[in-house]
Amino acid sequence: MRATLLAATAAALALTSPAAQAQETPLVSANPTVPTAAGDLTFERVFASPSLDGGAPRGVKPSPDGRYLTVLRNRADDRERYDLWAFDRESGQWSMLVDSLKLGTGAELSEAEKMQRERQRIGSLKGIVAYDWAKDGKAILVPLDGALYLARLDGSVTKLDAGKDPLNPALSETGRYLSFVRDGRLYAGPADGAPVAISPPETSDLVHWGEAEFVAQEELDRSTGYWWSPDDRRIAVARVDETPVGVVTRAAIGAEGTKTYDQRYPAAGTPNADVSLFLMDADGANRVPVDLGADKDIYLARVDWAKDGRTLYVQRLDRLQTKLDMLAVDPATGKSRILFTEKAAAGHWINLTDNYKWLDDGSLVWWSERSGFGHLYRFANGKWQQLTSGDWAVTGLSGVDQKTGRVVFTGTKDDVLAPQIYALDLKAPSKIARLSDPAFANSARMDEAGRSLIVGRSNPGQPAQSYLADTAGKRLAWINENALDDSHPYAPFLASHREPRFGTINGPDGSKLYWKMTTPPLEPGKRYPVFFEHYGGPHSQTVSRGWGGALEQAIVDAGYIVFEIDNRGSANRGVEFEKQIYRAMGTVEVADQKAGAEFLKTLDFVDPARIATYGWSYGGYMTLKMLEADQGLYAAGIAGAPVTKWELYDTAYTERYMGLPTGEGAKVYETSDAMRDAEKIVDPLLLIHGLSDDNVVFENSSAFIAKMQGSNTPFEMMLYPGYTHRVSGPKISPHVWHSILNFLVRNGVPGGGR
């Protein structure tokens, strides 16, 4: 339940039509596939293909020589299936390199890959979901349906001898070797040959080489467990022993059967996996352990090679995530030394990041919150130089052009709700130039050579676009223009499209809280219900000037005002704003959401008796806490896949924000859970959960259900057999949203003004 996970399923926002706002009931008909008014969106259409948000390209990568740009494109007739395409910058032409339908076999993925995709939030995707350029730029490694292929630019494709279900496949840095994981062992060998196991055999199937452990994938954003050196001479390989980890017997309840899994799940306060790191040659010889220090209860956070291959850099994070050590490791002996230590502010935690880059000269561009806001620094010859400063945050390091010393990054210097792209010169960092259009919320990534930018942007009136730009930000070619012209899938609904308004209120402690509101057309004298969407957890920002999405518009079409507000604890507002949630989850964010509801009740177009609140994952937890804390404030609440007891959630996420559930920490956990005051809920509640959820396991909801039933407290629930934390799909998603709106109708919160 990283913030990306927790916010991933939380959806709500806006659109409408004159017919919708005049209705007393939401647009849910006996035959919901038929719109009730021309131009209104149905949930069936929102989740059908082609996507109303337009194309959603993934995995944009330049070729090593910079001539080609490759991208995974989803199909118009199947929004979740991706094929591999290439753009030739010389000819200006696009071509499909690999057709996933023609090449694929449709074979079922291994359980390990399914779970890894769940961790990456791509469990619903089909076809090609990842690929890797060979360093000579002549071929591309393509995993597909449990097999590996080499695709060439002439359209030819060769199947590699990798056996069944290779996991985490990669080409080595020079492209000479192919490597992957199978059955807990790391395999490597010539790319045109048959790789062999190079990690030692183990007597226990709980020991894995070359894989990232559960919490590394889920909470630390590290999906691999091995790293090739630049010259292919050595490989750093993680060894993960899950023996200490407790077993959760998880029932995956399907429509016509139940499977049980003894899942190694490190719940808060219990032992983590034993993770160690080794260095070995490409054939497995000369294996030596890396000295990670005397304390074994740490997280292997990040691993990187120096450009010359002479040093391995390892980021070691302590269990409570308040101290991060940068280790420099000798690849021959495994001996390590501490280069520097990053410490969290009092009452805060380390926000682990990928916003850093080792340069060819051995210096480091590094992101840190040591000043109170996330900024860039340079570490060279043991000394620090601050590159950016101020009461704003750098949100991403896009890249560095090492020839010119130009650093490109994104940040909130101009607008906390719309990140912009900036550049500075390492020799004169105080002069910051904006490269992006402030009318959009922007993101950017620079190619490895520092020759071009891949820019993404959107705003409330323009769905996501992406383009190739030079390092000055000038657009060279569209990757996905996504123009809202007559051919765009969203064109039939443009007439009723509603753009949001933004504003701020003061929270209970005086903090400035940003909000976003999208309304139907408002008729004078009428009051409208509110669909009050929230996430609320740390490490996330929901209020943005980006594209809201078709689902947002469909909810407004149903006659609701959609409202959200970012409470204390959310990201990109600085340490003092974020850390107020530390060891206090379920308190300050609940109070700030209450301030949002009270603000809504002061508006003459809001019906104060029809404010319904909704959230998923951490947002589902928030729904429960909000209903428990402020009875009668909300007309109804929807809680999707909520955490109800933090002792049931994993170590890395929970302990980062809550500490350990022992000693004085036990009281913190008791106060923060949603179980203790469950019977205080008097407002209508709908509880939703997937019965195969391996992230927020169903025991969270089953325990809450039992507590509600045991106290004779009424509520409703909708459970989804076979679905994990993502209860989604072209048929299931409409069912979820019809269930939500029908629940609101039954409980006095219909859409439309009155």
Image: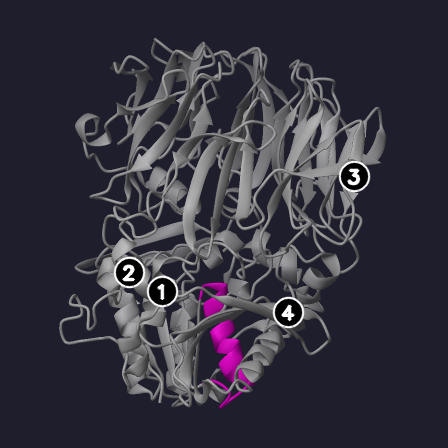
**Nearest the eye: 355 or 320:** 355
Task: Decide if residue 691 is in sight here.
Answer: no
**Nearest the eye: 38 or 743:** 38
Residue 238 in percent (x, y) is at: 55, 30
Q: Which residue is mark 3?
A: 341
Assign the magenta stretch its main secondary structure. helix
Q: Secondary structure at mark 2?
A: helix
In the picture, measured across the screen, residue 398 lies left or right of residue 109, that is right
For the residues labelled 3 and 1, the Cα–Cα distance comes to 47 Å
Q: Which residue is mark 1?
A: 553
Camera-nearest label, 2 or 3: 2
Q: Amino acid at mark 1?
A: Gln
Indicate the quadrant where residue 176 lies. Answer: top left
Disc 3 + disc 1, Cβ < 8 Å: no
Query: What mark, if any, has residue 513 been given in the picture?
Result: 4
Asked which colour scheme the image uses, the reply is one colour
Which span is picked out in magenta? 616-634
Q: Which residue is mark 2?
A: 493
**Badge 4: how crowded within 10 Å, few (<14), some, or many (20+)?**
many
First in residue order: circle 2 vs circle 4: 2
Disc 4 + disc 3, Cβ < 8 Å: no
First in residue order: circle 2 vs circle 1: 2
First in residue order: circle 1 vs circle 4: 4
Residue 468 in percent (x, y) is at: 48, 30
Q: Amino acid at mark 3?
A: Thr
For the residues labelled 2 and 4, the Cα–Cα distance comes to 32 Å
| Position above or below: 478 against 348 | above
The magenta stretch spans residue 621: yes
Q: Amino acid at mark 4?
A: Leu
